[in-house]
Amino acid sequence: MSKDQQAAPLRVHHHQPGPSCPKCETFTRFVTSILDVKRDRSILIYRCDGCREEVWV
């Protein structure tokens, strides 16, 4: 990416529940996102409401 190019902001609806936790099958909530520059994609990070584990999607 050149100095003049900027990445578009990622739009995530914070009020929607995320994927189910693989450990306890409880809903998760969006925490943050990070950019994987090698694969040119965003990684979404959620936190489980039950066991507080992080789920990366």
Image (tube, rainbow, N blue to C red):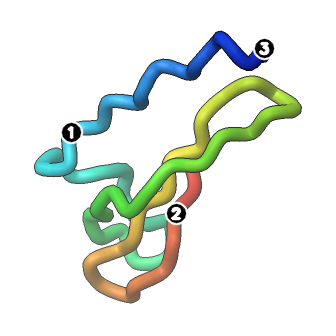
Name the residue at the bottom extreme. 51
Depth order, front residue of 39/24? 39
In the image, is 16 to the left or to the right of 27? left
- Mark number displayed over residue 2: 3
> Which residue position holds label 1?
13
Which class describes the residues within 10 Å of circle 2: few (<14), some (14-19), or many (20+)?
many
> Is 46 above or below relative to 8?
below
The percent coordinates of residue 40 (x first, y second) are: 74, 24
Of badges 2 and 1, the one in the foreground is 1
Q: CA distance from mark 3 to mark 1?
A: 29 Å
Which class describes the residues within 10 Å of circle 3: few (<14), some (14-19), or many (20+)?
few
Q: CA distance from mark 2 to mark 1?
A: 16 Å
> Which residue position holds label 2?
55
The percent coordinates of residue 27 (x first, y second) are: 26, 64
Q: Residue at x 87, y 32 (%)?
A: 38
The percent coordinates of residue 51 (x first, y second) are: 38, 88
The earlier-in-sequence mark between 3 and 1 is 3
Q: Residue at x 66, y 28 (%)?
A: 41
In the image, is 29 to the left or to the right of 57? left
